[in-house]
Image (tube, rainbow, N blue to C red):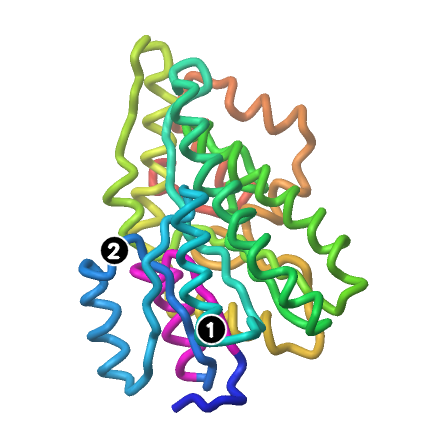
Amino acid sequence: MTSSTSPVAVVTGANSGIGRAAALQLAQQGYRVFGTVRSIEKAAKLQARAHDLGVVIELIELDVASDSSVQLGFNDIFRTTDRIDVLVNNAGIGGNGVVEESTPQMFHDAFNVNVVGAVRCLQHVLPKMRAQRSGTIVNITSVVGKLAALAQAPYVASKWAFEGLSEELAQEVAPFGIRVAIIEPGVTKSSIFAKNIDAPNQTGAYDSHYRRMFAFYAAGIVNATPAEEVGALIHHAITTDTPQLRYACSWGGPEIVAGRARLTDSDWVTMAATDDDSEYYAAFKSAYGVDLGKS
């Protein structure tokens, strides 16, 4: 149960995966939670799970890709509350393709949701937080925001941009008592994988790149971390007395982030230059401690 003094959280993309887990976790911890979804009619699973847990998620129809939709959605939120304590920027889309074969529109779409979508929401929330001189922004980036994963150029580019924006924001809002936490998941159980199966391969020149990308996700899906674990981490990041800027998590996340930090740029490029998949998989395991099951 929430009360008039309960902290208020907004979670974008709350209908599935990490967003749903975060919304439910925060509601269970006593937060008043507004969960944004593109279609309330399609949020039956979220509502059923909330009912089973005995919590309430207040659904707000909002598409982060649209200025007007975000405006209307936050108008609805501010009709019933004059404060927001937490914003979880989770809504996102994938985007497969090597740079040569990814259309400009693919990059526009990935950036519009994964980066500009977060900015739209931030610009509605930050004035409230500055006035309160408190609040937490949780930005869900990805392990591919730290490692340029093969054949996912639009997704990688947008998540690297979101990492940079988050670092920028953390410095900008610190004087106002506002914290930023960056969550960098590896492979987490989510419906995004069923929607992210494109492999343009228009030229036929990049067979190995797409093959290695799908090998990574095939291994990851088998071992995928439950989204509820990420939801619990988000709550920890919000409430801890010893906050960090970044939290790598889920299958492959901490190992890949640490491995890439150890690897020289020359070694990183050399690893991908081999035509031999077995050699690549072995090098990947050696560098990151992640077994793609192919070596």
C-beta proximity under 8 Å, tags 1 and 2 = no
Whole-number angstrom distance, CA of label 1 to CA of label 2: 25 Å
Query: How far from the left and from the top, in percent, is residue 281?
Result: 43, 33
Closer to the eye: label 1 or 2 = 2
| Mark closest to the chain's N terminus, 1 or 2 | 2
Label 1 secondary element:
helix
Say which quadrant the C terminus sits in. Answer: top left
Q: Is residue 181 magenta?
A: no
Determine the residue positioned at 38% across, 39% down. Answer: 94
Q: Residue at image x 42%, y 74%?
A: 33
List the residue tagged with mark 2. 39
Q: In the image, is residue 159 above or below residue 264?
A: below
Q: Where 206 sits versus 214, above or below?
A: above
Q: Residues within 10 Å of mark 2 (few under 14, many from 20)?
A: few
SS category of the residue bearing label 2: loop
Magenta segment: 8-28
Residue 21: name its quadrant. Answer: bottom left
Q: Count the marks: how many? A: 2
Under mark 1, the amino acid is Ala
**Residue at left 53%, top 64%?**
87
Is residue 286 at least partly visible in the picture? Answer: no
* Foreground residue among 274 and 189: 189
Residue 23 located left or right of residue 84: left
Residue receiving disc 1: 232
Label 1 neighbour load within 10 Å: few <14, some 14-19, many 20+: some
Is 195 in front, or is 295?
A: 195
Kindly identify the amino acid type of the residue bearing the numbered disc 2: Ser
The picture places residue 116, in percent across and down from the top left corner, at: 52, 41
Percent position (x, y) of residue 146?
59, 42
